[in-house]
């Protein structure tokens, strides 16, 4: 399947459009609902971080690219922005054995993303943040 691309403002109110862009294809491919829900969580975490922090206090664009592999069946997603350089994978995972009040603030979103995808990669190229994930289904 070829790569599809969606370009839009990195704004919180555009989350439903991004989610629909990805999940409509998954539903057409009879992707199990559990996987769709995991992907929706991943999209929300990544997109909300870009919308909230990449360009703050300014506005900017985000590009979402999706493609599919046949064998094994997998979704490939990339979130690309030209905002501040930020590699979320550099942060150590939170200590989930601690109570909420004892944990440092932040880091739980990327931890949840890592737990719900099969691979995740970050690169900074040509002035852009590129966060790519792969989810088998």
Image: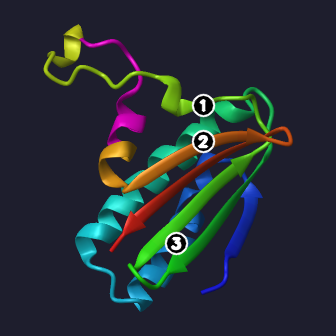
Q: Does the magenta stretch include residue 105?
A: yes
> Which one is earlier in the sequence, the residue at label 1 or at label 2?
1
Question: Which of the numbered marks, if any, corresponds to residue 78?
Answer: none
> Which one is earlier in the sequence, the residue at label 3 or at label 1?
3
Q: Are the residues flagged by discs 2 and 3 in contact, CB closer than 8 Å?
A: no
Image quadrant in which the C terminus is located? bottom left
Magenta residues, start to end: 103-112
SS assignment at label 2: strand
Q: Which residue carries the number 3 mark?
A: 22
In the image, what residue occupies the spot 59% across and 67% down? Answer: 17
Q: Which residue carries the number 2 mark?
A: 122
Residue 11 position (above or below residue 72): above
SS assignment at label 1: loop
Residue 51 position (above or below residue 103): below
Residue 8 location (% of width, % of height): 74, 59
Q: Does the magenta stretch include residue 54?
A: no
Residue 12 position (above or below residue 73): above
C-alpha distance separating marks 3 and 1: 23 Å
Residue 21 position (above or below residue 82): below
Question: Which of the numbered marks, if any, corresponds to residue 87?
Answer: 1
Q: Are the residues flagged by discs 1 and 2 in contact, CB closer than 8 Å?
A: yes
The residue carrying pointer 3 sits among few (fewer than 14), some (14 to 19) or many (20 or more) residues within 10 Å by Cα, namely: many
Residue 93 location (% of width, % of height): 34, 25
Label total for image:
3
C-alpha distance separating marks 1 and 2: 6 Å
Of all residues, the one furthest to the right in this rendering is 126
Q: Which of 35 and 135 is in front in this view?
A: 135
C-alpha distance separating marks 2 and 3: 20 Å
In the image, what residue occupies the spot 51% across and 25% down? Answer: 90
């Amino acid at each position: 399947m070829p790569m599809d691309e969606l370009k839009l403002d990195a704004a919180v109110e555009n989350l439903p459009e991004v989610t629909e862009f990805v999940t409509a294809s998954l539903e057409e491919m009879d992707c199990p609902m559990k996987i769709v829900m995991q992907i929706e969580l991943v999209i929300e975490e990544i997109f909300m971080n870009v919308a909230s922090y990449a360009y703050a206090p300014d506005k900017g664009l985000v590009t979402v690219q999706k493609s599919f592999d046949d064998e094994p069946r997998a979704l490939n997603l990339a979130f690309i922005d030209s905002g501040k350089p930020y590699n979320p994978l550099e942060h150590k995972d939170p200590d989930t054995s601690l109570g909420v009040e004892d944990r440092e603030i932040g880091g739980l979103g990327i931890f949840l993303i890592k737990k719900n995808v099969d691979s995740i990669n970050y690169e900074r190229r040509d002035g852009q943040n590129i966060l790519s994930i792969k989810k088998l289904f």
